[in-house]
Amino acid sequence: MDTTDENKMKELAQHLRCPDGDTGIEVANMMNQVNNNIITRTIESLNISNENSILEIGPGNGNHIIDVITLGSNLMYHGIDISETMILEAKKNNIQFQNVSFQLTNGENIPFKNDSFDKIFTVNTIYFWENDLAYATEIARVMKEKAVLSIGFIPKSAMEQIPFTKYNFNKKDIQSVINLLEKVGLKIKDTITDVEMVFSNTGEEIEREYVVLTATKQ
């Protein structure tokens, strides 16, 4: 890989972590297409029901949120993200919904009270948690009793085949995520693994394994 290609990979990795500016918006649009299936499967695993309070960590541009808030009546959706660009895009794309809100966060603290949410989900963010144990503890804190958490991610074995993930991605295998959630007192409910054909962020068609791991708070 020459220096130009390496710099492009580094830039892409940075925007996947925290999309910024016009390039970040373009990357987020690609992410919507590439991750559509894993986002859908993660949302389905939550079994959202009427009057649920829902938190998404890392909603990106929020184009999928209509698929969440139409799954029941009197739902409340909250999205938090470390990217100011994505918060602005998500607000713009969901301005018509009164039961949807977004908040810029620091990636360390979740700015809600204890026992706030019935359902929490996140897709392809776990590689970027700076202190994964502290952040998992925060997630558990804001979950109500019997709340459900679903994490969609690409396992380490598959991530290692994707060149840009060598730049600041903390790759996770399934067992390490299970161990992490169990450490903060959550009980593993289900683990879904599947394989899909997707166009990568560099435009190549690749076979990609993904995981949707679901846990509950007892």
Image (spheres, rainbow, N blue to C red):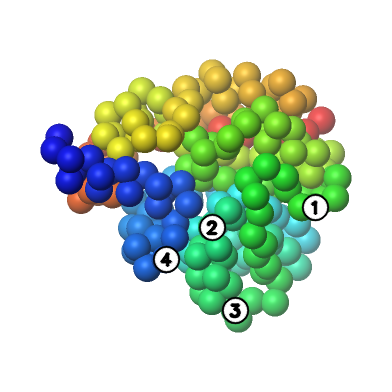
Q: Upstream in the sequence, badge 1 or badge 4?
A: 4
Instruction: Give the CA distance from mark 1 to mark 4.
Output: 27 Å
Residue 83 marker: 2
* Mark 3 residue crowding within 10 angstroms, few (<14) / some (14–19) / many (20+): few
Amino acid type, callout 2: Ser
Q: Upstream in the sequence, badge 1 or badge 2?
A: 2
Instruction: Give the CA distance from mark 2 to mark 3.
Output: 18 Å
Q: Nearer the viewer, residue 48 or 95?
A: 95
Residue 21 marker: 4
Amino acid type, callout 3: Ile
Which residue is the site of mark 1? 112
Amino acid type, callout 1: Phe
Q: Nearer the viewer, residue 66 or 135?
A: 135
Position of residue 177 measured from the top left corner of the image (x, y, whole percent): 57, 25
Asked whether, in this view, residue 1 is left or right of residue 137, the answer is left
- For the point 80% across and 52% down, the residue is 112
Q: Upstream in the sequence, badge 2 or badge 3?
A: 2
Asked whether, in this view, residue 143 is left or right of residue 27, the answer is right
In what element is the residue under mark 2? loop
Instruction: Give the CA distance from mark 2 to mark 4.
Output: 10 Å
* Mark 4 residue crowding within 10 angstroms, few (<14) / some (14–19) / many (20+): few
Position of residue 132 measured from the top left corner of the image (x, y, whole percent): 62, 31
Which residue is the site of mark 3? 95
Q: Is residue 171 above or below residue 77?
A: above
Image depth: mark 3 or mark 4 in front: 4
Position of residue 36 measured from the top left corner of the image (x, y, whole percent): 40, 53
Asked whether, in this view, residue 17 is left or right of residue 94, the answer is left
Which quadrant is home to the C terminus? top right
Image depth: mark 1 or mark 4 in front: 4
In what element is the residue under mark 4? helix
